[in-house]
Image: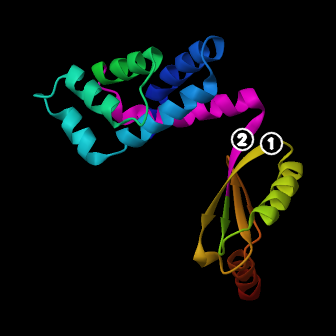
Amino acid sequence: MAEIATIARPYAEALFKTSAGRANPDMVLEWLGEMSMFASDEQLLRLAANPRVTAAELVDLIKGLFKKELNSEAQNFLRLIIEQSRLEVLPEIYQQFKVLHNSLKGSQDAVVESAFAIDPHTLNEISALLEKRFARKLNLTVELNSELIGGIRVVVGDEVLDTSVKARLEQMKVELME
């Protein structure tokens, strides 16, 4: 995977530099995320690998998938990615762009795994506690994971805070086996 990250980095950085100066980075993040979603589709990737499909046809097809019309910057970026046969790298470009975008805003993405749905009020309280704990603004995404039994597991970059019942049971098991 390091190779894909290495390929994606210059695209993400160049797009970030140009969008931070001219366009709204939030808007770029939106269309780049949508492009990334399309580029994750196996059928589209197989079509892109077909030598009988031209780059212009592929660009037109993907442009037609968007909910709203793409601006010229987005169209040029899409055309460049397709002409350089880098469509499969788009999801990684999006992830790297998102990291740069978050650093500009002084925030970081975080995933909160929970065995049960979390109501908005409780999520706000958890968010405030986590922001103090990790000393930065966090963009929380909640994922349900019934294996946790109870509690939560939080992943912020390469840091993990696991207060789940499953983790506590595993810890007790290790202590009892010693």
Quarter of the figure with residue 61? top left
User: Secondary structure of the magenta portion, mostly?
Assistant: helix
Provide residue 107's location: percent of width, then percent of height: 75, 38
Label 2 belongs to which residue? 108
What residue is shown at x 59% (from left), y 20% (from top)? 16
| SS class, disc 2 | strand
Rendering colour mode: rainbow
Provide residue 160's location: percent of width, then percent of height: 72, 57
What residue is shown at x 34% (from left), y 27% (from top)? 86
Provide residue 38's location: percent of width, then percent of height: 37, 40
Residue density around tag 2, few if under 14, some if 14–19, many if 20 or more, within 10 Å: many
| SS class, disc 1 | strand
In the visual, does 91 lie left or right of 157?
left
Give the residue type that dot 2 points to. Gln
Q: Mark 2 or mark 1, which has the lower sequence index?
A: 2
Give above or below for 28 relative to 114.
above
Asked if residue 105 is among those painted magenta in the image, a careful observer would answer yes
Q: Please identify the residue farthest to the left as the structure is shown.
A: 52
Confirm or deny contact between disc 2 and disc 1 (CB under 8 A): yes
Label 1 belongs to which residue? 137
In the visual, does 85 lie left or right of 19?
left
What residue is shown at x 83% (from left), y 42% (from top)? 136
Quarter of the figure with residue 171? bottom right
Provide residue 83's location: percent of width, then percent of height: 28, 19
Give above or below for 164 relative to 82.
below
**Which region shows up in magenta?**
84-111
Residue density around tag 1, few if under 14, some if 14–19, many if 20 or more, within 10 Å: some
- In which quadrant of the rendered image does the N terminus lie? top left
What residue is shown at x 36% (from left), y 17% (from top)? 80
Q: Please identify the residue farthest to the bottom as the structure is shown.
A: 176
User: In this view of the protein, can residue 2 be seen by the observer?
Assistant: no
